Amino acid sequence: MDFELMASMMCANYGNLEKEVHDLEKGGIDSFHIDIMDGRYVPNYAMSLNDLKFIAKATRKPMDVHLMIEHPNTHIRLFLDNLREGDTVYIHPEAEYHPSTTLQAIIDKGMIPGIAINPGTSVETVMEMLRIVKKILVMSVNPGNAGQMYLPYVGRKIDKLLELKEEMGFDLYWDGACSAKRIQEFAPKGVKGFVLGTTLLFGKDKPYAETLKDIRTLKFED
C-alpha cells in the first residue's frame, strides 16, 4: 500500500542534525516535517526559523512546515522566503483573524496550502477552508509536545473528512502518536501520509532505513 512518511524533526538528535537529515534521506523518508512553535499558540517552544533554513539547505526532499504560531500572516514571508516551490505550509485556522489571506500568500509563492485541525476543532468550523487547501493535517493529540497519548475520538473526525476529500479536493495527513496500528487502520481508509515521531521512528536502536522499511512493509487486511 502506498502512503507518505514524514519525519517529525523536533524529535531528531540536534547534536548532529546534518547527519540526521542525511540518514533519514538515505533511509527513504518522503519529506521533513518542521514544527514551528512560538510559546503562545501552544505552550511550548520547538523549532525555529534557523532550524528550517538549515534543514531546507541540507536536503532536496520536500519540506512540510507546521506553523503553531499566533497570527501567522504577520511573519509568513519569513518562512516562505526560505522554502521552495512545492513545499507545504500548514496554519491553524484559530490562530488567524483571516486565515484565507494567509493561505493565499502560501498559494501565491507556489507552495501547497494546508490547515492543521486540533482535536477540539470540529470539521464544521473549517468547512469553507476545505475548498481552498490541498492538505489537511489532522492532529490526533493536542499540539505542542511530542510523546502524547492518542485521542480516540479523532478517528470519527477523520472518517468525516475522508467522506469530503474527493468533493473538496484535499488530501488527509495524520500527526501525533502515530503507531503501526494507526497506519494499518487509516491508510486503507484513505489517509495519504503520516508524521513519524518518537512512537515509531526516533529513539529506536536501529537505523532509520530499517525502521522505514519495516513501516512500508506493514501487513494490511484485505
Image (cartoon, helix red, strand yellow):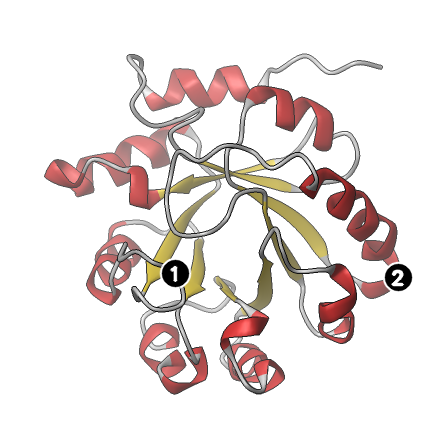
Q: Position of residue 73 (x, y in %)?
A: 44, 84
Determine which of the numbered discs, if any, sits on residue 216 in the image: none
Dot 1 falls on a residue whose secondary structure is: loop
Q: How many marks?
A: 2
Q: Earlier in the sequence, mark 1 or mark 2?
A: 1
Q: Is residue 130 visible?
A: no
Near-viewer residue (143 or 213): 143
Q: Residues within 10 Å of mark 1 (few under 14, many from 20)?
A: some
Identify which residue is drawn at 25% across, 66% down: 49
Identify which residue is drawn at 79% across, 34% down: 189
Identify which residue is drawn at 82% across, 49% down: 160
Is 198 positioned to the left or the right of 128 in the image?
left
Distance Cα–Cα, label 1 vs label 2: 32 Å
Quadrant of image for the N terminus: top right
Dot 2 falls on a residue whose secondary structure is: helix
Tell me the kind of residue under disc 1. Answer: Val
Q: Position of residue 80 (x, y in %)?
A: 39, 75
Q: Is residue 17 above or below residue 48?
A: above
Q: Is residue 204 above or below residue 31?
A: above
Is 198 positioned to the left or the right of 98 in the image?
left
Near-viewer residue (67 or 22): 67
Tell me the kind of residue under disc 2. Answer: Glu
Determine which of the numbered discs, if any, sits on residue 167 in the image: 2
Residue under label 1, please give it. Answer: 42
Q: Position of residue 135 (x, y in %)?
A: 64, 59
Quadrant of image for the C terminus: top right
Q: Can you tell which quarter of the image residue 40 is in?
A: bottom left
Mark toward the viewer: 1 or 2: 1
Q: Position of residue 89 (x, y in %)?
A: 49, 65
Near-viewer residue (95 or 73): 95
